[in-house]
Amino acid sequence: MSGSPAMRDTAEAVLGLLPTQVQYGDVRVVRRTHEQVLVELDGPGEVGYDDSTGLGLRVLIGGQWGFAATHRLDRRGLDAVVAQAVGQARAAGGGGRVSLGSPVTTRDTWCSPMQVDPFTVPLSSKVDLLAATVKEASTAGPLVQQIEASMDFYRDEKVFANTEGALIEQTLTESGGGLMVNAGDGDDLQRRSFPQGVPRQIRGQRGDFASAGYEHVISLGLDREAARIAAEAVALLSAPQCPDEITTLIAGSNQLAMVLHECAGHPMEADRALGTEVSLAGGTYATPERRGTFRWGSDLVSAYADATIPGALGSFGYDDEGVPAQRTQLVKDGIFLGYMSGRESAGALGLESTGQAKADGWQRLPLVRMTNICLEPGDSSLAEMIAGTKRGILVDTNRGFSIDDQRMNFRFGTEVGWEIRDGKVGRLLKNCTYQSVTPQFWASLDALGGPDEWKVHGVPSCNKGEPLQVAHVGHGTVPGRFQNVQVGR
């Protein structure tokens, strides 16, 4: 499965319309399909389906960029999009300097792995699974006030071509699903999500996602876990508050994924280090002069970005500038080493692109985006960390966070926690929060789970850019233990 001949013809036709003064140009022709199925407590199922096709064109003239996009793929539409992009670049007046590094000349096709095409699975089967999940969750009793079970499926068929000779066709299929339960007693409201939490304001698109087919949704076991998740939401209503103290914190793999996302993923995007992201989401502590010397964490911590992991949500064959997917070391033995980059941001730093320029659909410019941000596993285990802790708390499933504009000072809240006393898991705790400073927090890490506990979590809701772009990313993590962390304040 790959882009249609018509999409290839359109891409090549656009390049053929570019005037001779264009120093560089690239075009992406994209068809994006999205299906969402959602079932709620005491409500009928909802189905959403979107299918759009269009192209985005970038041109470089006199060191200045021009960009335009259109859904009109006839000759009149192609002429108009070329005129608009070229006109923008010329209006900037020239005199700019852009280094794109080595030419991209690849000609290839690539498809993400898939066993069962989710778009061929009957809608009735999807609704039945979600309805069974909601029914199981409702067995937790009358304090359950809201249940939302959902599935989402995406397919991007993309053709990329540039003036350097590249022609790349890709098809990416992504599948995911999840459950959210809210319980309330009139005085308190508690939430539990499975397999992982997402912001409540996002309708659907919750749970765990992968570059895979319908088999991934089946593997989640939503209906099997629903009763337990709902029972925990109800139990949290009467659970004691998280204590206010400095203590040992053990973060589950799911929760550590979000800390890694905010403390390493976003700060180590090269465009942020160059100041082009500051207006929306701030800058970064990971400035170019700190590369190779800044102590980010303890010697146990190594982190990397890897878009080649089979089935991970942040994986692909080539980015939206035609650069091959690759692994990039970000932190090694606690030292900040490198950035995720696209061709322009890498060129500004005197480097080659790490292949992490992605656009949210055909109508947006490629930005530097996370792929799969991963922790290298350690040699411990969650059970060993708990057994070796006299007093502390165990937390998991992100509920919310705040972080400063340099990605240093942060505060995370989790859906659930448990006290640890004398090496054993004790009472359930609610409203667990913890706060720290990025290098101090990671420097306090003294244990990481081993390879058997390493898991990739797929998150389809990473926001960046103006206008806003949403990226689908992955995080490979294990449980970790941190000493002397402020919790509960």
Image (cartoon, helix red, strand yellow):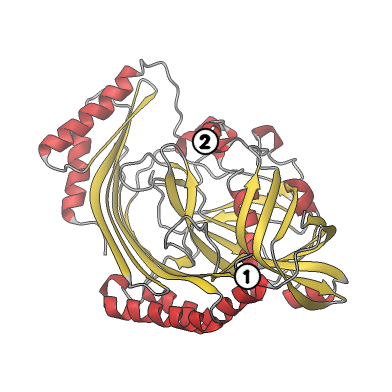
Residue 218, quarter of the rendered image: bottom left
Q: Nearer the viewer, mark 2 or mark 1?
A: 2
Residue at 39% across / 38% down in the picture? 103
Q: Which residue is mark 2?
A: 280
Is residue 285 positioned above or below 307 on the image?
above
Is residue 290 positioned above or below 194 on the image?
above
Looking at the image, which is closer to me, 227 or 344? 227
Q: Position of residue 289 (x, y in %)?
A: 69, 32
Residue 325 visible within the image: no
Q: How many marks?
A: 2
Label 2, label 1: how far apart the Cα atoms are: 33 Å
On the picture, is 71 further left or further right than 357? left
Q: Residue furthest front?
A: 186
Other-residue count near label 1 (Cα within 10 Å), few / some / many at <14 / 14–19 / ≥20: many
Q: Position of residue 138 (x, y in %)?
A: 49, 80
On the picture, is 439 further left or further right than 127? right
Residue 175 visible within the image: yes
What amino acid type is highlighted by mark number 2?
Leu
Mark 1 or mark 2, which is nearer the start of the sequence? 2
The quarter of the rendered structure image containing the N terminus is bottom left
Checking the image for residue 377, the label placed there is none
Q: Residue furthest left?
A: 75
Residue at 61% across / 50% down in the picture? 262
Other-residue count near label 2 (Cα within 10 Å), few / some / many at <14 / 14–19 / ≥20: few
Q: Which residue is mark 1?
A: 454
Residue at 70% across / 42% down in the picture? 408
On the picture, is 464 further left or further right than 93? right
SS state under label 2: helix
Q: Position of residue 294 (x, y in %)?
A: 74, 41
What amino acid type is highlighted by mark number 1?
Trp
